[in-house]
Image (cartoon, rainbow, N blue to C red):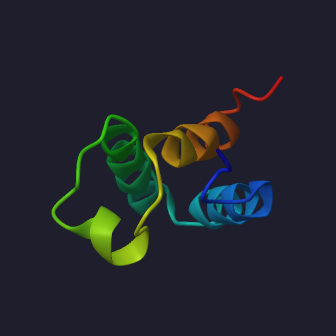
Amino acid sequence: MSKSYTQQEVEDRAQHILSLPPMTRAGTINEFYNMAEGESEFGIREEYYPGKPNQFFKDVLTIVTGGEE
């Protein structure tokens, strides 16, 4: 089974989040945590990330939170 996203998409999204103003960034990170658990976040997931699995959001969070090894 192939992933429905690329590593480049993950990195691009992470860099976008890191470039946001602090308050916006914090809110976006919270949304990503919720979407990583399968939530919709008031339709944000369906509108902006159609077809993205929970793992996509987890992968972005790993970069954004400095969890890279």
Give the residue furthest to the front.
1
Using residue 69 as the reference point, say whether residue 29 is left or right of it: left
Q: Is residue 49 above or below residue 63?
A: below
Q: Nearer the viewer, residue 55 or 31?
A: 55
The residue closer to the viewer here, 21 or 6, is 6
Give percent across and percent down for residue 48. 40, 74
The answer to which quarter of the image holds residue 49 is: bottom left
User: Which picture quadrant has residue 69?
Assistant: top right
Residue in view at x 53 percent, y 39 percent = 55
Q: Position of residue 12 (x, y in %)?
A: 72, 66
Q: Is residue 65 above or below residue 22?
A: above
On screen, residue 31 versus residue 13, left or right, reads left
- Going by the picture, which residue comes out furthest to the left? 42
- 47 to 13, vertically: above or below: below
Left or right of residue 35: residue 53: right
Residue displayed at 40% across by 39% down = 36
x, y (%) of residue 1?
A: 64, 44
Q: Residue at x 68, y 50 (%)?
A: 2
Q: Position of residue 15 (x, y in %)?
A: 70, 61
Residue at the far bottom: name it. Answer: 47
For the view shown, which residue lies furthest in the top direction? 69
Q: Count the marks.
A: 0
Residue at the spot 77% in from the left edge and 29% down from the top edge: 68
Q: Nearer the viewer, residue 63 or 48?
A: 48
